[in-house]
Amino acid sequence: MLVIRIGLVMLQGARHVHISSLNKAARDSNIEIKIIQLRKSSDLLIEEIHAIIIPGGESTTMRLTGNSSDSLLLPSLLDWLRKRPNLPVLGTCAGAILLSDPQDGKESLIDATINRNAYGRQIDSFQAEIQTPLLERTFPGVFIRAPKFNSDVSAEDVVAVCDGEVVGVRKGNRIALTFHPELSEDVGFHRWLIERASTIMEVKNVS
């Protein structure tokens, strides 16, 4: 049986909740997965990886940790992803910030600029229903010190909207969400990631 190996960036944030969401999505999809925890650049080389999740957290802390000499995961990951434009990626909250604003002097991985902490402080966190054409239904959004995409997002790149605001964008197989899908009981986005990776691998194996 094909096993989908998912690299989970472990720099900071709601990493372990993502693991639970991934395992539930795998059961729902009847697809076997293996989660590879990424803490340093060498972890990218241990096994072939079919998808990546960059969790939420605090983007400044993630940059400091990921760029430290003990890790160097962040610069290695960004370049690794640029060389694999078809690889499915899910970046949530701070993960969306890193995809949109890598701050390494190179092109961003999502075609949208972003405003960090635009929704306010921790006390301004909220939950709201999201319309998502990617899943073709609504989704329970959890926003915690959430960023906002600026108005330069093309309509065809939008995958999630909340009260008229764009809260999810897509570039190919890369998805950036300003909310935390892992904090809801709905694993639709995690299931999308797994199923997308599985489809790509099946096509690759046939060809």
Image: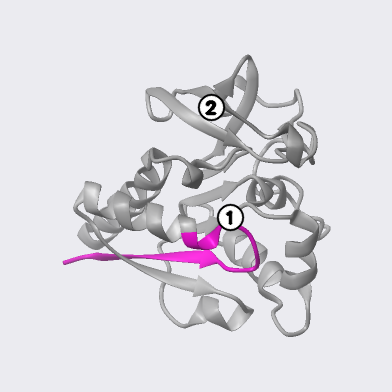
Specify the amino acid type for callout 1: Pro
Q: Is residue 48 magenta?
A: no
Task: Decide: is 194 above or below 179.
Answer: below
Residue 13, image x and y in percent? Answer: 62, 59
**Label 2, residues with CA under 10 Å away: few <14, some 14-19, many ≥20:** many
The residues colored magenta run: 1-16
- Left or right, 140 with reference to 58: left
Residue 111, image x and y in percent? Answer: 67, 38
Res 5 → quadrant: bottom left
Q: Which mark is residue 55?
A: 1
Residue 51, image x and y in percent? Answer: 44, 59
The quadrant of the image that shows the N terminus is bottom left
Specify the amino acid type for callout 2: Ala
Instruction: Say which residue appears at 53% left-offset and 61% top-offset.
Output: 15
Asked if one can make out residue 89 in the rendered structure from this viewpoint, the answer is yes
Q: Which mark is residue 160?
A: 2
Q: Secondary structure at mark 2?
A: strand
Asked if one can make out residue 173 in the rendered structure from this viewpoint, the answer is no
Res 134 → quadrant: top left
